[in-house]
């Protein structure tokens, strides 16, 4: 077990496809809890869930028959067939559950703001991305405000025009300002910026301190105890960024 570095912003080890579903579950609930402290009694942040069947590549042992090397003869050559199998990846279907938030006005039950925390399935060419983009476009075509949090370096970014390339981003789309939107972009070595959550006009907008909520997740889930910081995260970092992570770990010792 290695010493946990103190990241100024996002911890890249949380992005692992195996670890992210747990992080996502904790974080979306903690965002709701945090918001409800300031939203109630007029509004409420509710945890919603969509379920769909997606196809993904998973590593499973392929069925292999071991045999003695044989020679296949043709008219002029003999080809040796190896008895060592290759390990391959097969497409498998799986049920995917993704949680998101809806801020509703309690008196009318009208959805004022939708908040999405992206998952790997949303950023690869799959059913998860198609369903997400359809839902995203429906929200952007409505009177509902939209917040999209992307803490994953890997995968295809969501459609938009403009903005600099960055490792991570938080998108704030106010219904009355579309097609314009506010984008909080940041890289691995930079702090995660707090961001406002838009509400109906005339209401004070709560501010989400995502970095503090992630720190809470570390503690609640005991994530650091399951991470070896001497190895590359998944997806891997560039060499200079990995060296930077190692320097943070050495300071923490």
Image: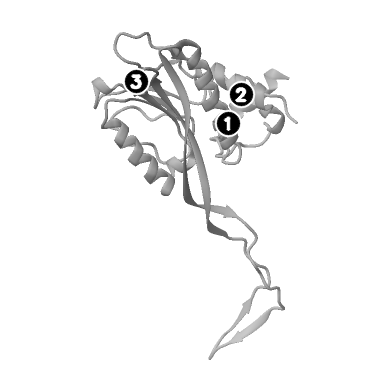
Classify residue 240 by image quadrant. top right
Q: CA distance from mark 1 to mark 2?
A: 7 Å
Query: What element does badge 3 sit on?
Result: loop
Question: Label 1: which residue?
Answer: 23
Q: Which mark is residue 108?
A: 3
Q: Residues within 10 Å of mark 3 (few under 14, many from 20)?
A: few
Residue at position x 66%, y 23% in the image: 220
- Mark on residue 96? none
Mark 2: which secondary structure? helix
* Residue at 53 percent of width and 19 percent of height: 33
Q: Please tell me which residue lies in front, 232 or 204.
A: 204
Mark 3 or mark 1, which has the lower sequence index? 1
Q: Which is closer to the viewer, label 2 or label 3?
A: 3
Asked whether residue 125 is in view, the answer is no
Q: Is residue 213 visible?
A: yes
Mark 2 sits on what residue? Answer: 217
Tag 1: Cα neighbours inside 10 Å, few (<14), some, or many (≥20)? some
Quarter of the figure that contains the N terminus:
top right
The answer to whether residue 2 is left or right of residue 32 is right
Residue 152 % position (x, y): 49, 34
Give the mark, 1 or 2, whose residue is nearer the N terminus. Answer: 1
Q: CA distance from mark 3 to mark 1?
A: 32 Å
Q: Position of residue 175 (x, y in %)?
A: 27, 23
Q: Residues within 10 Å of mark 2 (few under 14, many from 20)?
A: some
């Amino acid at each position: 077990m290695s010493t946990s570095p103190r990241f100024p912003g996002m911890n890249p080890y949380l992005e692992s496809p195996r670890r992210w579903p747990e992080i996502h579950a904790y974080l979306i609930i903690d965002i709701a809890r945090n918001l409800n402290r300031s939203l109630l009694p007029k509004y409420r942040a509710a945890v919603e869930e969509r379920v769909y069947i997606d196809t993904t590549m998973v590593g499973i042992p392929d069925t292999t028959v071991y045999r003695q090397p044989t020679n296949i003869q043709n008219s002029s050559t003999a080809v040796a067939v190896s008895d060592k199998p290759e390990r391959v990846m097969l497409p498998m279907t799986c049920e995917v559950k993704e949680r998101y938030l809806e801020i509703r006005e309690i008196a009318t039950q009208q959805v004022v703001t939708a908040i999405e925390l992206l998952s790997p399935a949303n950023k690869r060419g799959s059913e998860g991305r198609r369903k997400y983009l359809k839902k995203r476009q429906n929200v952007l075509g409505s009177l509902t405000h939209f917040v999209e949090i992307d803490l994953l370096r890997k995968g295809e970014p969501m459609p938009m025009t403009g903005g600099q390339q960055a490792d991570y981003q938080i998108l704030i789309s106010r219904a009355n300002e579309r097609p314009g939107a506010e984008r909080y972009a940041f890289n691995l070595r930079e702090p995660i910026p707090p961001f406002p959550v838009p509400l109906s006009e005339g209401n004070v907008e709560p501010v989400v301190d995502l970095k503090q909520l992630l720190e809470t997740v570390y503690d609640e889930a005991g994530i650091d105890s399951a991470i070896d910081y001497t190895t590359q995260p998944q997806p891997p970092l560039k060499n200079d960024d990995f060296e930077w992570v190692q320097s943070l770990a050495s300071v923490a010792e």
